[in-house]
Image (tube, rainbow, N blue to C red):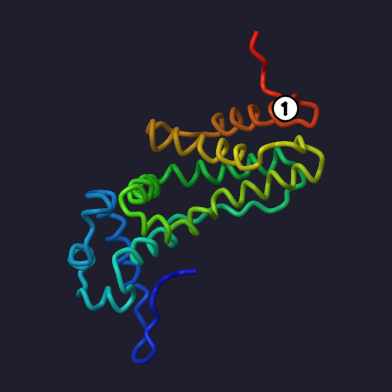
Amino acid sequence: MSRQVQRRRGRPLDDGTTTAILDATLELWGEVGYAAVTVDAVATRSGVSKPTVYRRWSAKRELLIAAIERFVVPADVPDLGTFRDEVTEFLRNRAEMYRQPRVRRMMAGVVAACTEDAEFHGEVQQFLDRFPAAMRLIIQRGIARGEVRPDTDVDMLTAMINGSFYYRTIIEQKGVDERSVQFVVDTIMAAVPPGARSDPPRGR
């Protein structure tokens, strides 16, 4: 749910102004980093007054989280009938998301901000949890259909799938395409069939 503060009386908040403020927030965050973003700078960049910003968000932290929620939308993959199809669709959505430079800057900024500000990390966690939640649901559906090994570590597999494109695009700053999607999907499908071994290899 958006953290935007609604006015109780008077004229309704102008949506164009809200968009301008959030655009300015994202631009500044990408340019100077979380710690250097200020309400003063956002107001100047967006061409509004500080009170205009504060009528919508009571603190910088709320403003940054609103920018995340507006511009980075986690994918919601419906039941497509097979585990492979759902993982493929999920990764295609993620690839499309990470092709946007603004999204890459923001996601990198979120991680950096979480290491700098524990309170921000606590408040933004609900947003961040939406990404693994979608993949956990896909894996659980695969287990229920008998396509995925029932003793699969759902959280670890979720982290592997979600982390692959994040690392590729944000840490390595390389692109992801349909070939990338199919490679990850093929790798996952080879690891999770019901007949696959679950025991770790023993040393000799």
What is the x, y in percent for residue 148? 75, 37
Determine whether 176 is above or below 98 in the image.
above
Q: Which of 125 and 171 is in front in this view?
A: 125
Residue for point 54% across, 50% down: 131
Q: Nearer the viewer, residue 44 or 150?
A: 150
Residue for point 75% across, 42% down: 142
The residue tagged with tag 1: helix, strand or loop? Answer: loop
Determine whether 16 is above or below 150 in the image.
below
Q: In the rendered image, which quarter is residue 203 located in?
A: top right
Determine whether 142 is above or below 199 in the image.
below
Residue for point 28% across, 49% down: 30
What is the x, y in percent for residue 61? 33, 63
What is the x, y in percent for residue 126? 50, 59
Q: Nearer the viewer, residue 118 or 50?
A: 118
Q: What residue does disc 1 label?
A: 198
What is the x, y in percent for residue 27? 28, 54
Determine whether 199 is above or below 53 in the image.
above
